[in-house]
Image (tube, coloured by chain):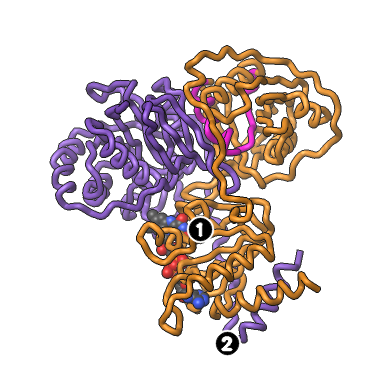
Amino acid sequence: METILVLAHTETDGSLAKPALEALAAAKSLGGLLVVGLVGENVQDAANSIAACGAAKFFGVCGADFAQARYATDAAAAEAIAQAAGAPVIIAPHTSRWGRVLAGVAQRLGGRADTHVTAVSLVNGAPAVTRWYYRQRMEAVLQRAQRPWVIALDPGCVAPWRGEAGTASVEKVAVNLTDAHKRTTVTGVRAPKAEEQTIRPDAKLLFVAGAGWTKKQADGQVHVAEAEKLILDFLKLTGASLGSSKSLVDLSGEGQAVLPFMTHLNQIGQTGSTPRHPKGLSTCCHGEEPHTVGWRFINERRAISLDPSCGWARGKADVLYVADAFQVMAKVNELLAAKKSS
Amino acid sequence: MSTAYQIVVCGSIVPDPLQTLEPVSTPMGPALKNEMMLPAVLDPWASHALFEAAHLANSAPGSKVWLISIAPKAKLQQVMMTIAQKVPFELVALDGPAGGFTEAAEVAAILADAIKAIPGLDMKRLLVFGGWESASRGAGATMQMVGELLGITDQFQGVDQITVNTDGSLEILERIEGGKHQVSKCAGPPAVLGWATGSLPEPPNNPQIGMANMRAIMPALQRAKPAKIAAEGVTFVRVTLPKQLRETKIVKDTPAYEIAKEIVAWIANE
Ligand SMILES: Cc1cc2nc3c(=O)[nH]c(=O)nc-3n(C[C@H](O)[C@H](O)[C@H](O)COP(=O)(O)OP(=O)(O)OC[C@H]3O[C@@H](n4cnc5c(N)ncnc54)[C@H](O)[C@@H]3O)c2cc1C
């Protein structure tokens, strides 16, 4: 097996997040010589936290300029470490920060990149990656002749590396920055207020709301306020992450009755996200293919829809409850609240 | 300060997402069954990039929008019939494969050359837009590589919003983990922006825009040079469809309370 560089960035507190430890575990599973490259304001604590991982060498690019997730400085840092390490295979976590730069870095290095990789393996003694094509519709295993080969591993696909902390000796790699690297400044993060934060990547359950919540019900009326309360109460009681169908989040652009806490960031599917959760509960959603491709990595799936012949019934869910989601979710919330207070 | 932008949108075509897709192997590598027969649409996130480009151009007088597309000419022409009615742009067409199993680096090299060949290109006014990921390869790699080949190192991915500040700098919102946006201030063009859904609804069809666009689109399609794209150096070990069907248990005619009990038990079950 060829030498592998695991390339990671630190978090604002100087630690390594789970996706970085997952990339490390994936690299170790291939065998071969391992080197680690770290980028961030400070990298020593991060290096120490994985001192026992078996890396032959630790490289680091650090300083205040590398605190922010900015293309120009991140690409320069990653390039410098890759040059210093000279490893033919580079494995990195596909975080939003690395996702922005890794393909550009591969281009700079004269190599190739594969992103959103879900597994690495050896095929005939050489590394191979697994990734999905056509928005999770088909899965491919592929190998490449070009080097360096930059592999961005999606978070949540591999058990993270665990081991004792220690003391690592980090070889500092210098990067010459000019004003051109600093034309962009990251000024902050815009996030909903904590209590309105409905997207929770680590939640055990994904709760999906479809357009049905805003449609006329049996009494000929829409019940958006009731829908809002039922959904938010459920999220509060379970800590579930909130997903949406496209139709529901598009409604706001069309001036129709909407659930104000939903945005396109909640959208699951073809033009939305493909989150990873152990369970998913769909409500008032038809389960059409462009939506359900976003459920590829949801293990157990249940759905509540009035329509017995909706997409969920056709092999897309484990259980379909043909029922009124307003009624069912009201009872679910009652039971959950009673359980909490008991 | 006002800048007239040159906005180049990179975007190709993909099969309509309502279609069922099946991989087949060909002497050239994997492909889709009946690929040339499948109805196509402009890649959804690239469409958002195009709408955002037109919106920005509209607010900065003197700006112009190009759409550069590498796709089989005949299919691109079909897609242009609808897209041309949405917003004003000039098409630069290249006749080549648009499938997901082609190599991003090869596509990027051709796109970058096509951008460099735009007459009167001015890097100080250039914004390169595209989708942050395609609906075919879904890698989010092409735009970064195009940027590198053009020497543009102010790059943004998963963009949902761009605002031009009074001093000409750009405020850009990018999607990051956990339903949040990273906010950046970029001094100005040149920059690469890979768009997510953005913040604009799809523009309605406007036949007048369509007619004006089509006058230049037809000759652009006729001029389309062949683009040789494959996946040099890549070996696909296998391409498979996932086990698609679950055995769905359908629960009907059951009181809401009973269903609720079952769901609560299921949620609690580790
Ligand atoms: C290019 C493209 C990209 C797309 N990308 C996506 C994507 O990323 N994500 C996505 O979701 N879609 C996507 N779509 C759209 C997709 O095809 C569907 O139109 C959409 O998913 C439908 O949303 P829905 O199921 O919420 O709404 P509807 O189809 O309106 O279904 C509503 C459902 O709610 C049920 N219902 C109503 N009231 C109740 C009640 N009281 N109790 C229980 N059930 C009730 C109805 O029976 C119905 O089944 C895309 C389409 C295209 C063309």
The residue located at (72%, 72%) in the rendering is A337
- In what element is the residue under mark 1? loop
Query: Which chain identifier belongs to the orange chain?
Result: A
- Of the pair B101 and A320, the residue shown nearer to us: A320
Tag 2: Cα neighbours inside 10 Å, few (<14), some, or many (≥20)?
A: few
Q: Chain of mark 1?
A: A
Image location (x, y in percent) of residue A199:
59, 53
The residue located at (65%, 64%) in the rendering is A300
Quadrant where the N terminus of chain B sits is top left
- Of the pair A96 and B68, the residue shown nearer to us: A96
Tag 1: Cα neighbours inside 10 Å, few (<14), some, or many (≥20)?
A: many
Magenta-drawn segment: A86-108
Q: Identify the amino acid type marked 1.
A: Met
Q: Chain of mark 2?
A: B
Chain B drawn in what color? purple
Q: Which residue is mark 1?
A: A262
Residue A129 shown left or right of residue B20 in the figure: right
Instruction: Check residue A91 for magenta coloring.
Output: yes
Tell me the CA gap for discs 2 and 1. 31 Å
Q: Is residue A29 above or below residue B122?
A: below
